[in-house]
Amino acid sequence: MDHRTDTRTKIVATLGPASEQPLVLDELLRAGVDVVRLNLSHGTLASHLQRLVDVRAAAQRIDRVVAVLADLPGPKVRSGQFPEGGVHLSGGAGLVLSPGDGPSTAGHITVDYPTLLLDLQPHDRIVLGDGAITLEVMEVTADEARCVVLTGGRVQGRPGVHLPSERLRLSTPTEEDLELAKAMADAGADFLAVSFVRTAHDLRLVRAAIQPHTTRLVAKIETMSAVNDLEAIAAETDAIMVARGDLGIECPLEDVPHLQKRIIRYCVEMGVPVITATQMMESMITAPSPTRAEVSDIANAVFDGTDALMLSGETAVGADPVEVVRTMVRIAARAETEAGYRQWASRLGRVQRSQWPEGPDRITMAITHAAGMAAADSDAHAILCCTRSGRTARAMARFRPVITLIGLSPDPATVRTMALSWGVRPLAVETYHSTDELVWFAVERSVQSGLVDPGHTVLVLAGAPDRPSGASTDVLRIVRVD
């Protein structure tokens, strides 16, 4: 099996016209992609279902564990169509907004949001597109909202219109989201990313819609409402995405790096995989190499402790998607050589002891902490996590062990979802009926895969195979591999 060993931080790449051809897709996965993202905001459901099939085929061709993340569109507010070629909005110029679906001009922008004038107030900030163009509301009348352009630029097509989220009446998830979620869960997607999450209740609605599937959910943190409800959202979701694009529109730009660090730290402490996303290598959509600022951005996300780094347009429509991934892998690998993982693990141990949860998680957290210390004391080469749900591997990954971390499961879906967790090398195993058998075959499987060699010392974490799924991990064995 092909195992990437040069970086522990996982790579999420968006599939699109530049990367969907089989030869390119194969090379993309070989370059180091762990999770393929399908952006359901663009294209048809049929096209995304085909892409899911294509990713599964590519992963099988190159013998690599790859997960698929289907990213739901969420509520979208858009302007009316601008003239072909677009128009330039000049800073300081005045214009008006009104609800409707007619064409837009430089002086009058229509917005497909019926309650626009009820939900706007003077001094509100409105952002068009990716955030380059901002407007300030000066006055709201019965017919229009009069605005001034704060930062200008060219606008074309039907750009998104970002309104104050705390007053936005669009619900999350939308009916379209729920229909797409069910279709992608039926087709076997590993993760569903829920856009514009504001509370944990939004996630529960998606879970209910995809029953009986247990497809994992990714909560996109892109509103201040979500930031303020982070604890409840993290408890409800399976992973979190720091969606810095819309988050940077919702709050002052200077706050975004601090929120990123806060969200990542909390997620790692809780054992919730976290993805850092948006404009990580934006310049490489057209350029052959990233900017120095982008390199620093990637390295800082690694230093923060993120589980995964995400690429969007860079791999979906970029000039050289494969080179983008190779470049990101090199930057992440270099950053990992100076990341303070040992200090992180020591700090996490102290935090954990002050915040012990009740129930099975308490035992799992305690034994993974013990495994981290035992690995150092025994000079172990690898930690093997036997898991049905992936929870043990995620709990162990919180400590960011510097040695090889292997997740073994008899459930193919669990094997794929472990591809998102920091440092975890996923392996499929059979179902066994005793702890001795489980430990023995876990070690044998790791040797066969080339991740463990004879003479190595390994730690094996497991629970009794005959106990129900969700029970705590309560077995830790130190094994000398013959």
Image (cartoon, rainbow, N blue to C red):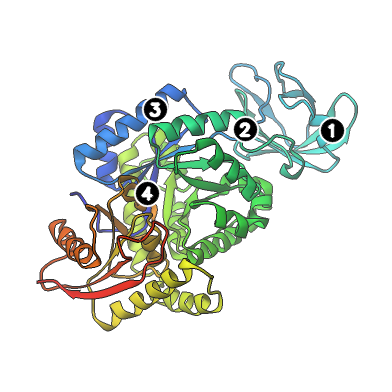
With respect to residue 175, does 101 lie above or below?
above
Dot in front, 2 or 1: 2
Assess whether mark 1 and mark 4 are in contact (beta carbons under 8 angstroms): no
Residue at the disc numbered 3: 49
Marks 4 and 3, Cα distance to the nearest angstrom?
A: 18 Å
Q: Position of residue 236 (x, y in %)?
A: 56, 53
| Between discs 4 and 2, the one toward the N terminus | 2
Residue for point 48% across, 52% down: 238
Crowd rating for badge 4 (residues with CA inside 10 Å; few <14, some 14–19, many 20+): many
Q: Which residue is mark 4?
A: 417
Residue 31 at x, y = what percent? 27, 46
Query: Mark 3–mark 2 contact, CB under 8 Å?
Result: no
- The quarter of the picture where residue 367 lies is bottom left
- Is residue 438 shown above or below 152? below
Residue 280 vs residue 107, the one in the foreground: 280
- Residue under pointer 1: 118
Give the image quarter of residue 339. bottom left
Classify residue 265 as left or right of residue 413.
Answer: right
What amino acid is labelled 3 in the image? Leu
